[in-house]
C-alpha cells in the first residue's frame, strides 16, 4: 500500500456531521519509541484513525508520530479515553491528553470504563461541555452496557456517539447489536483478535476460501456489520495485512456463519 492509499472509507456518520473511519489503528500496550514508530508506519500505510488512551501512557508518542507525519490535522481521526479514576477531574484529564498529543482538539473522547460500575452521569455532562466548547468533536463510552448507556441518555438527553467494547465473531450478540443500532450508537471493537478464536474452523474455512488470514476475515466481518475496529500490531507486515481487507467481500451466508459461530461454540 502506498501513502496515497488512505482509509477514509468506509466511515461511520456521527452526530454533528463527524465522519469516523471504521478501520483504525490500536496502540495498546505500546509505549515510547515502539508506539511512535508503529503509529508513524500505520499512517504511512494509510490508516487514518489512531486509538489511544490516557491509561495507555503513550499519548506523547502518538502525538510525536502525528507531528512527524506532516499530515494535515483534518486527515487523521484521533481517539483518546479518560480512565474512571479521573471522575471529578475531567477537564484537567482532557487538557493533559491534548498537551501530550500536541493537539487543540481530539476527534473522539471516550469514558474508558463505567466509573465504579455506574454510568457516570456527572462525568458525561462534562464530556458534553467539552464537545460543545470544541475541545472534542464527538463523545462516547467504552465497556458500557445498554442499561448504562440508557442512563446517560435519560439523565442528559445525549447518547454516546460510540460504544467501544470487546467484540468478535466469538462474542457476537444479535440483541446487543440491535440495541445499539436502535439507540443510534455506533459499535466499536477493541482487541478484535484477542477476543476471537483464530482457530475456529468456520473462520479458517472462510479465510481459505478467500485466500485471506483469519485476522483479515475478522476485520472484514466487523466492517460489513458497520462496526468500527482498531486492530493493533507493531509488526509492519501484520499492520499491512490487517488493513488489506478491501479486495474481498464476505457473502451474506458467510456473515451468517460467522454470526452463528459464537452460539455454536457456546453449546
Image: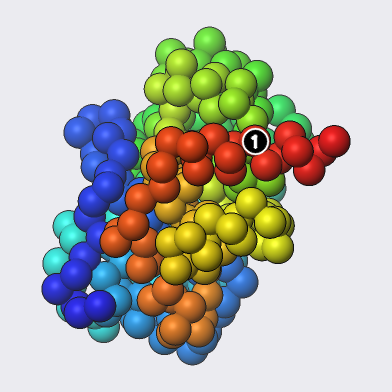
Q: Residue at x 27, y 35 (%)?
A: 13
Q: Nearer the viewer, residue 140 or 257?
A: 257
Q: Which residue is mark 1?
A: 260
Q: Position of residue 89 (x, y in %)?
A: 56, 45
Write down the quadrant of residue 118 in the picture: top right
SS category of the residue bearing label 1: helix
Q: Is residue 266 visible?
A: yes
Q: Nearer the viewer, residue 92 or 263?
A: 263
Write down the quadrant of residue 167 in the picture: top right
Q: Position of residue 221 (x, y in %)?
A: 47, 47
Q: Nearer the viewer, residue 4 or 87?
A: 4
Is 101 left or right of 140, judged from the image as shown?
left
Q: Residue at x 47, y 46 (%)?
A: 222
Q: Is residue 35 visible?
A: no
Q: Position of residue 120 (x, y in %)?
A: 62, 29
Q: Residue at x 61, y 47 (%)?
A: 168
Is residue 227 depicted above or below 8 in this figure? above
- Which residue, as the protein is rendered here, is positioned at the far front? 209
Is residue 121 depicted above or below 252 in this figure? above
Q: Position of residue 149 (x, y in %)?
A: 57, 23
Q: Residue at x 54, y 35 (%)?
A: 256
- Which residue, as the protein is rendered here, is positioned at the far top? 154
Amino acid at each position: 500500500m502506498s501513502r496515497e492509499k488512505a482509509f477514509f472509507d468506509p466511515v461511520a456518520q456521527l452526530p454533528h456531521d463527524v465522519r469516523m473511519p471504521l478501520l483504525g489503528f490500536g496502540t495498546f500496550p505500546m509505549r515510547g519509541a515502539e508506539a511512535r514508530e508503529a503509529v508513524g508506519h500505520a499512517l504511512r500505510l494509510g490508516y487514518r484513525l489512531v486509538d489511544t488512551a490516557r491509561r495507555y501512557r503513550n499519548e506523547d508518542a502518538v502525538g510525536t508520530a502525528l507531528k512527524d507525519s506532516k499530515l494535515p490535522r483534518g486527515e487523521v481521526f484521533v481517539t483518546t479515553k479518560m480512565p474512571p479514576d479521573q471522575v471529578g477531574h475531567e477537564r484537567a484529564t482532557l487538557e493533559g491528553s491534548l498537551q501530550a498529543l500536541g493537539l487543540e482538539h481530539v476527534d473522539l473522547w471516550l469514558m474508558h470504563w463505567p466509573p465504579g460500575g455506574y454510568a457516570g452521569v456527572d462525568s458525561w455532562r462534562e464530556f458534553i461541555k467539552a464537545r460543545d466548547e470544541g475541545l472534542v468533536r464527538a463523545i462516547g463510552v467504552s465497556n458500557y452496557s445498554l442499561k448504562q448507556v440508557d442512563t446517560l441518555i435519560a439523565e442528559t438527553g445525549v447518547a454516546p456517539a460510540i460504544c467501544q467494547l470487546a467484540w468478535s465473531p466469538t462474542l457476537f450478540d444479535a440483541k446487543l447489536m440491535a440495541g445499539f443500532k436502535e439507540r443510534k450508537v455506533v459499535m466499536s471493537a477493541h482487541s478484535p483478535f484477542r477476543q476471537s478464536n483464530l482457530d475456529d474452523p468456520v473462520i479458517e474455512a472462510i479465510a481459505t476460501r478467500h485466500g485471506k488470514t483469519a485476522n483479515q476475515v475478522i476485520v472484514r466481518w466487523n466492517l460489513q456489520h458497520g462496526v468500527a475496529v482498531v486492530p493493533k500490531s507493531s509488526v509492519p507486515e501484520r499492520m499491512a495485512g490487517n488493513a488489506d481487507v478491501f479486495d474481498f467481500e464476505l457473502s451474506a451466508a458467510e456473515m451468517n456463519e460467522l454470526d452463528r459461530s459464537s452460539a455454536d461454540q457456546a453449546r
